[in-house]
Image (spheres, grey):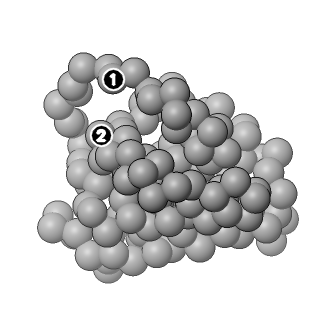
């Protein structure tokens, strides 16, 4: 399967997920000290978080998978996160609710990503999709 087809199918999968209304809280400024981590994984975070919230809520295990993915990317880039940064980034992921407006740019970034990174992202998507949920959207 070509990389473009894989990215397209992943994007279609995310768009097909039911939209569950959630209460939107106030916008919180992103902590400057975590900008490096967000910069390394920004579009991945958007896509994985949208998937994890397809049932309206991101479970702790789902957020942990996303956090591990981001921390692994930082390690492979030679700039591992400190324990404090990892904890703060986990807090950021807990409250993150990407909008559909972020989806298009995230998919376009993914299209320009190296094949190995896309494969790693899809592997995380599979881990998220296989996790049981209360509402049963995933884990079938």
The quarter of the rendered structure image containing the C terminus is bottom left
| Corner quadrant of residue 95 | top left
- On the image, the x and y values in percent for residue 33 come to 52, 34
- Distance Cα–Cα, label 2 vs label 1: 9 Å
Q: Which secondary structure lies at badge 2?
A: helix
Q: Residue at x 66, y 69 (%)?
A: 120
Q: Which residue is mark 1?
A: 28
Q: Secondary structure at mark 1?
A: loop
Q: Viewer-proximal residue, 3 or 67?
A: 67
User: Given contact means CB atoms under 8 Å apart, are the residues at marks 2 and 1 in contact?
Assistant: yes
Provide residue 125's location: percent of width, then percent of height: 52, 66
Q: Is residue 53 left or right of residue 31?
A: left
Vertical comparison of 13 with 103: above or below? below
> Which residue in the protein does label 2 denote?
95
Q: What residue is rendered at 22% in x and 69% in y? A: 133
> In front: 71, or 5?
71
């Amino acid at each position: 399967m070509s990389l473009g087809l894989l990215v397209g199918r992943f994007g279609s999968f995310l768009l097909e997920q039911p939209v569950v209304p959630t209460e939107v809280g106030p916008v919180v400024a992103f902590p400057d000290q975590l900008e490096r981590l967000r910069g390394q994984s920004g579009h991945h975070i958007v896509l994985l978080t949208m998937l994890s919230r397809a049932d309206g809520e991101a479970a702790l295990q789902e957020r942990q998978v996303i956090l591990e993915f981001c921390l692994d990317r930082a390690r492979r880039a030679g700039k591992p996160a400190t324990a404090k940064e990892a904890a703060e980034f986990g807090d950021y992921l807990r409250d993150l609710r990407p909008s559909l407006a972020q989806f298009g740019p995230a998919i376009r970034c993914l299209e320009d990503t190296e094949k190995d990174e896309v494969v790693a992202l899809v592997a995380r998507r599979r881990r998220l999709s296989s996790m049981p949920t209360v509402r049963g959207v995933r884990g079938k």
